[in-house]
Amino acid sequence: MDRRLTEHGVCFVCGRENPHGIGVQWWVREDGTVYAQVTFREAQQGPPGHAHGGALAAVLDEAMGASVWAAGYMVLAGELHIRYLRPVPLGQEVTVEGRIREREGRKIYTEGRILLPDGTVTTTAQGLFIEAPHMFPPDIPLRWQPVDT
């Protein structure tokens, strides 16, 4: 059963308190894949009528990072590699996914993708996240925990 993940405040991608944010609501599948349905708006426009590459990178960064946080690791992004395969139209709902590929010590390797409604992959990503609990206050909750819906 898929579970909704908590959102957090003013985050540019998923914070509901950010009037300039994208407003993504994340879900996690039983296999640990994090996903969301996203519709990019004019505020995220790059080429006319299409989403900006930076907006696409931001949601992929967040999807991959959320998959790691949901697995219980406090991390920071170390590397992101984005491949833009096809433009993403504004006003069309797309699916964004992120998941852990493997873990090697403090390094957690991830992958993500954006898909059009017909399943066409528009953008792919690989990420390296580094466990860094010392960077966070000791009482910080794992903000990417599933919540009951």
Image (spheres, grey):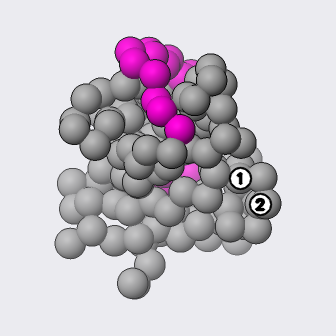
In this picture, is 48 found above or below 16?
above
**Which residue is identified by label 2?**
18
Residue 21, label in figure = 1
Percent position (x, y) of residue 114? Answer: 38, 35
- Looking at the rendering, the stretch of residues picked out in magenta corresponds to 66-90
Could you classify mark 2 by the number of other residues whose Cα lies within 10 Å: few (under 14), some (14-19), or many (20 or more)?
some
Question: What residue do we see at 55% from left, 28% from top?
Answer: 50
The reply to whether callout 2 and callout 1 are in contact (CB within 8 Å) is yes
Please tell me which residue lies in front, 116 or 98: 116
Mark 1 Cα-neighbour bin, 10 Å: few <14, some 14–19, many ≥20 = some
Q: Hey, which quadrant is residue 97 in on the image?
A: top left
Of residues 79 and 97, the one nearer the viewer is 97
Q: Residue furthest toward the bottom?
A: 148
* 30 within the magenta span: no
Which of the numbered marks, if any, corresponds to residue 146?
Answer: none
- Vertical side of 37 occupied by 99: above or below: above
Which amino acid lies under the numbered mark 2 shown in the image of this protein? Asn
Q: Nearer the viewer, residue 149 or 110?
A: 149
Amino acid type, mark 1: Gly
| Label 1: element kind | loop
| Residue 16 visible in the snapshot | yes
In the image, residue 101 sits, relative to residue 79, either above or below, namely below
Residue 147 in the image: above or below residue 132: below
Tell me the SS state at disc 2: loop
Residue 86 sits inside the magenta stretch: yes
Direction from residue 139 to residue 131 in the image, left or right: left
Q: Which residue is found at the position 76% from the left and 68% from the top? A: 17
